[in-house]
Amino acid sequence: MTGVHHVYVLECADGTYYTGYTTDVERRVREHDAGEGAKYTRGRTPVELVHTESYASKSEAMSREYEIKQFSRARKERLVAGET
């Protein structure tokens, strides 16, 4: 989907969460699993996609990515569980 920007949350093999931004979620998850994603996820594979959100603009998505990265572990768990 061109023009759609995504924020995603991965659960790493060690149980930690990683939040990122992309325009192609499937490709990005494959990159993380192959050890070609963010430095943080390289030693924590395999990863599992546990949450995504879509936005019309890159700035909206990047702002949301930053917001989620500031969440506590408990707040991220609520987000992943679908709670508001």
Image: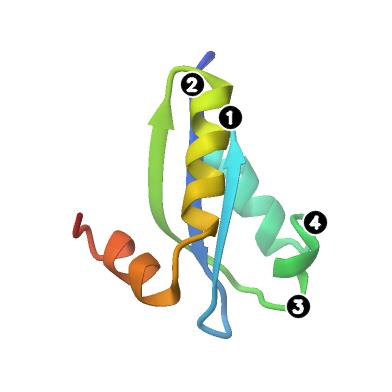
Task: Give me the residue at 66% from left, 63% from top.
Answer: 33
Task: Give me the residue at 42% from left, 26% from top.
Answer: 55
1 on left or right of 82: right
User: Callout 2: helix, strand or loop?
Assistant: loop
Residue under label 1: 23
From this view, report whether residue 37 is shown above or below residue 78. Answer: above
Task: Of the two numbered discs 4 and 3 on the same chain, state the one appearing first in sequence.
Answer: 4
From this view, report whether residue 10 is shown above or below residue 24. Answer: below
Task: Give me the residue at 53% from left, 36% from top.
Answer: 63
Q: CA distance from mark 2 to mark 3?
A: 29 Å
Marks 4 & 3, CB-CB < 8 Å contact: no
Marks 1 & 2, CB-CB < 8 Å contact: yes
Question: Could you say which disc has been placed on residue 43 in the image?
Answer: 3
Q: CA distance from mark 4 to mark 3?
A: 11 Å
User: Callout 4: helix, strand or loop?
Assistant: loop
Residue under label 2: 4
55 on left or right of 25: left
Q: CA distance from mark 1 to mark 4?
A: 16 Å
Residue 40 spot, x, y in % from top left: 74, 68
Q: Residues within 10 Å of mark 2 (few under 14, many from 20)?
A: some
The amino acid type, in three-letter code, at marker 3 is Gly
Q: CA distance from mark 3 to mark 1?
A: 24 Å
The amino acid type, in three-letter code, at marker 2 is Val
